[in-house]
Amino acid sequence: MKPPRLLSGATMATLSESIQVPPKGERFFLYTSIAMALTIVAGFGMQLGMGRSSFASPAIVHAHAIVFMGWTVLYLAQNVLVARRARTLHRYLGWIGAGWMIAMVALGTIVTVRLVRAGYAPFFFQPLKFLLLNPVSVLAFAGLTAAAIVHRKQTAWHARLHYCGMSLLLGPAFGRLLPLPLFIPYAYEATFAAVLIFPIIGVIADLRRRRTVHRAWFWGIGVIVGSTVLVELATYSPLGTALYRQVTAGSRGAAVDPLGYPPFPGPPPTVRP
């Protein structure tokens, strides 16, 4: 009987690759994608559970919710596929996501404009700031996502830019989890600080794992900060006021002070037997 042969280094490497255990970098993006999805579910789920949201909304609001929640599912699925080495399906879904992103920009802007024209804005945001922050945020998200697609062959750039884009979409969820009325007049700034939590975690993870910070984080965080600065500057500029007047012309929103805070919600109406 021949003695068993020891496996060569090349054979051992092949066997190691066949065991689909994602490396630390991919596990980081997988686990954080799960955390992001849970943050969104928690924010909007709490809103629904407290009776602050209703299914009795216009169809376009439901379309907006489906499309944005669909992106969350897609982002999570993409990270699962990468962890499982399903590269072909990952690339296929990536091109679907590119078209999906266009729908998100359109619906995010349309719904915000309709709400402002109807004279609505959350009472912890100035109406003009509310008009600006959603479109600017979703456009910044689209810019980071488009850059991630362009750099799809540079996986380090690709993953981090997508991650920062997804972080921008967490603003509405954090806005529902944070006690924003207590932060007036800095409710928007508090939301911005919360949005930076995940990118900062990414920077720390790079420092621990790589002993350096990948340049993609600087671009991603720079876009997030830049979008916030743009909203702040435009809100208190004549151009921002002119835009508000143009958007709300001929609607109930035209009678609303663009820089005045809406009144706090009153007590629920008394129901008589």
Image (spheres, grey):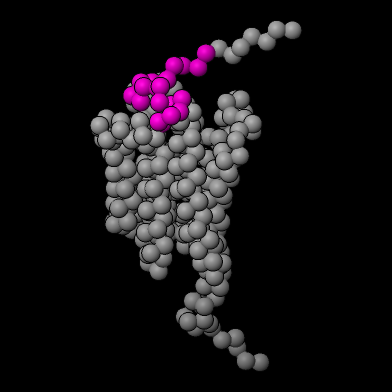
Residue 254 location in percent, x, y?
40, 26
**253 inside magenta stretch:** yes
> How many numbered marks appear?
0
Residue 155 visible in the current orientation: no
Q: Is residue 183 above or below residue 98?
A: above
Q: Where does residue 211 sit, x and y in percent of width and height? A: 30, 56
Identify the residue shown where x is 74% and y is 7%: 273
In the visual, does 270 lie left or right of 151? right
In the image, residue 68 sits, relative to residue 94, either above or below, namely: above
Characterize the magenta stretch by its predominant secondary structure: loop
Asked whether 232 or 28 is in front, the reply is 232
The residue under the point 35% across, 30% down is 245
Q: Identify the residue at image location x=51%, y=67%.
A: 91
Which region shows up in magenta? 248-266
Quadrant into which the N terminus falls = bottom right
Q: Nearer the viewer, residue 89 or 208?
A: 89
Q: Is residue 38 left or right of residue 181?
A: right
Q: Is residue 181 left or right of residue 227?
A: right
Residue 271 figure quarter:
top right
Is 34 included in the stretch rendered in magenta?
no
Farthest bottom residue in view: 1
| Lateral position of residue 51 relative to residue 116, left or right | right
Is residue 8 positioned above or below 243 on the image? below
